[in-house]
Structures are given as C-alpha cells and as structure tokens.
C-alpha cells in the first residue's frame, strides 16, 4: 500500500498540518474543524484528562494489586496518562502553530505513543470484560498470588509486545526532511513504509478481535444477570426488582458503553477513509474531505477514552472509591446510590455483583 496525501492506519500522520496541506490530486484537506474546533476540544480533553488521571494514579498508588481487575485498571491509568501527554503536540500541529521540529517530533514519536496507548487500552478493556464475565458466571472463583503474578507478567508482555511493534515506526522514521511542506511518510525509509503497513493490519486484528470478545462477554453477562433477576422478581415486588436490575446494568455495562462510544466509531470510519487514500479509488475531493473529517472527529472520540476511564474506576471498583473518599476526606455515605450491592437485592444476584464492584 502506497502512502498518498495522508498516512493511514495505526500511526495516522494527520497529527501534523503539513500532511493536510498536501493534496491528493490537488484536493486540500484544510478546514476550520481541523484548525480550530478540534484543537479546542483536545485542549479541554487535556485539562480534564490530566486532572482526572493524575488523581486516579495517586489513588491507585495506595491500592494493592489484589485482583485482576485492579491490575488491569492500573495499566489503563498509565496508558491514559501517556496518551494525555501527547495532546499538546497534536493541538499545536492541528492549529498550524507548530515549528518544524515539533512536526518532525509528532511524526517520529508523539503519534506513535498516542496509538500505542490507544491499543494498550483496547487490549486491557478486553481483559476487563473477560474478568467481569468470569466473576459473573463463577462468583466463587478465587484469586491466588500465583495467578496475580501471571496477570502481572501478562500485562508486562502486552506492553513489551506493543512497544516492540511500534518501536520500528520511530527508528525507521529517520529520513532527513528537506522541505517545509512534508508528510510523515516522507520521513520514513522504504522499510519503514513496509513496517507501517504491517502495524496497520496487526492493530486492525487487535481491535476487531477485542470487539468480538467484549460483545461475547457482555452477552453472557446479560444472560446470567437476567437469570438472577428473574429469580429475584419471584421473591420481591416486580417494580422493586426492575429498579435494582436497572441499577446493576447501568454500572456493570459501563465498560461496554465506553468501548463502543470511544473505539467503534473510529475503526468503522477508518475503513472507508483508508480506501479513499488508496491509488485508483474513485473518490472526489469533497468525499475525501468528508471522510478525512469523519476520521479525525471519531479519533477525538477515541481520545475521550482518557476522560471516561476514570468513570470505570469510580463506579466499578470499590477499592478505588474507598481510597478516593479517604483521600478527599469525603464520607462514602454521600454516594451510596452508586453501589449496586446494597439494599434488599436478592442474595444470589448480590453475590454475583459484589466482587465486580
């Protein structure tokens, strides 16, 4: 696959405005959305994400890694913080105020780190979905120290694997820039362009594979919760059972909601966008611009993941809530409604949910 006006795939080079200033057959990809609206939105994300994830990291430092869930969440916090630190470079590039050196840095490092952490988050959300499914279907399943060690090793392996996958994109983006107007692909060696193509396919497999895993897990969780709530309604008032069932689903399915909102639109938008960049494809200038803007807008939704993840920590992790309340000197009683294991919920359903929270 040859690179045309804008690089596609996991290390999309639309971070820098020079790629947009280039045209495919004279088609400009400049627009107020890219140079004004999205930089403002990314600035808001940067402030919120840095604040929320900084607080989350401080809280998690006080929580021992006593479950798979907490280990996965700690990895996501690290990934979100690294992603957040790439936002200022994207803001500068998209708003057309970045220097030459900054644009080169974006091509060689910043965009690589952004997508590295994006797919780290996708993988760990897939693992969280598997863990939630396991605890729903087998609530009595224990967690040994040996198993925790294996999960920590798995987490390290995931980071090492994706770093090894992305590192060549940094090393092989080594050509000397001779023009003030360049695309990131202009900085890549011939081997770098080939490796970039490999990374695109691998990351597509990562996303679609995790999407399948997440859907299957939450279908199984839904079936198990339906069975438990049906037994609950046979012993309690229908209205009371329905209210508590809704409360359970609102929290447990938060992971699914974040995954769908943040990652699905971007990966669906990238398919037609990538096709529009391939040689020989019949797309006019307006269609290319529309697909480009759609891809960049949904990429912002993927970045929104860094702000929404703290909601998962708060609503689904009792240890996080407790430690947060202690840190902020807040009484847990003020947020009792967030819990799904209180009240008069039938014992069987409560046991299935208790460890999830």
Image: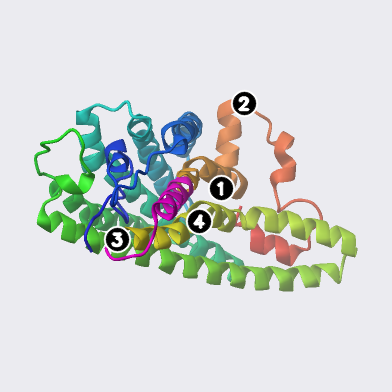
Q: Residues within 10 Å of mark 3 (few under 14, many from 20)?
A: some
Distance between the alpha carbons at the discs numbered 2 and 4: 39 Å
Label 3 sits on a secondary structure element that is helix
Q: Which residues are magenta?
A: 279-299
In the figure, 90 relative to 229: above or below?
Answer: above
Return the mark for residue 265: 4
Mark 3 sits on what residue?
Answer: 200
Distance between the alpha carbons at the discs numbered 1 and 4: 20 Å
In the figure, 328 relative to 271: above or below?
Answer: above
Distance between the alpha carbons at the discs numbered 2 and 1: 21 Å
- Foreground of the two, 228 or 47: 47
Q: Looking at the picture, how far across and down is residue 219, in whole percent?
A: 60, 71
Q: Earlier in the sequence, mark 4 or mark 3?
A: 3
Label 4 sits on a secondary structure element that is helix
Q: Main secondary structure of the magenta part?
A: helix
Return the mark for residue 329: 2
Label 1 sits on a secondary structure element that is helix
């Amino acid at each position: 696959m040859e690179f045309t006006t804008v690089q596609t795939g996991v290390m999309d080079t639309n971070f820098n405005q020079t790629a947009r200033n280039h045209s495919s057959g004279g088609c400009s990809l400049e627009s107020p959305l890219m140079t004004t609206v999205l930089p403002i939105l990314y600035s808001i994300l940067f402030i919120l994400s840095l604040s929320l994830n900084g607080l989350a990291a401080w809280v998690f430092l006080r929580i021992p890694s006593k479950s798979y869930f907490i280990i996965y969440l700690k990895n996501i916090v690290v990934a979100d913080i690294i992603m957040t630190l790439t936002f200022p470079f994207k803001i500068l590039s998209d708003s057309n105020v970045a220097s030459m050196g900054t644009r080169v840095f974006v091509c060689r490092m910043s965009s690589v780190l952004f997508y590295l952490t994006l797919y780290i988050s996708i993988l760990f959300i897939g693992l969280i979905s598997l863990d939630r499914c396991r605890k729903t279907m087998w609530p009595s399943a224990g967690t040994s120290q040996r198993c925790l060690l294996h999960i920590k090793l798995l987490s390290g392996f995931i980071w090492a694997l994706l770093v090894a996958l992305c590192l060549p994109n940094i090393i092989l983006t080594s050509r000397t820039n001779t023009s003030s107007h360049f695309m990131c692909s202009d900085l890549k060696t011939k081997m770098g362009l080939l490796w970039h193509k490999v990374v695109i396919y691998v990351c597509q497999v990562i996303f679609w594979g995790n999407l399948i895993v997440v859907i299957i897990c939450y279908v199984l969780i839904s079936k198990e919760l339906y069975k438990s709530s049906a037994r609950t309604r046979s012993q309690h008032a229908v209205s009371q059972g329905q209210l508590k069932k809704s409360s359970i689903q609102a929290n447990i399915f938060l992971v699914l909601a974040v995954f769908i909102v943040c990652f699905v639109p971007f990966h669906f938008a990238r398919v037609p966008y990538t096709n529009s960049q391939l040689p020989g494809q019949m797309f006019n200038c307006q269609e290319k611009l529309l697909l480009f803007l759609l891809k960049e807008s949904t990429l912002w939704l993927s970045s929104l993941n860094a702000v929404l993840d703290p909601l998962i920590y708060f609503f689904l992790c009792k240890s996080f809530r407790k430690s947060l309340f202690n840190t902020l000197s807040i009484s847990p009683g003020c947020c009792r409604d967030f819990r799904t294991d209180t009240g008069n919920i039938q014992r069987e359903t409560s046991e299935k949910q208790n460890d999830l929270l």
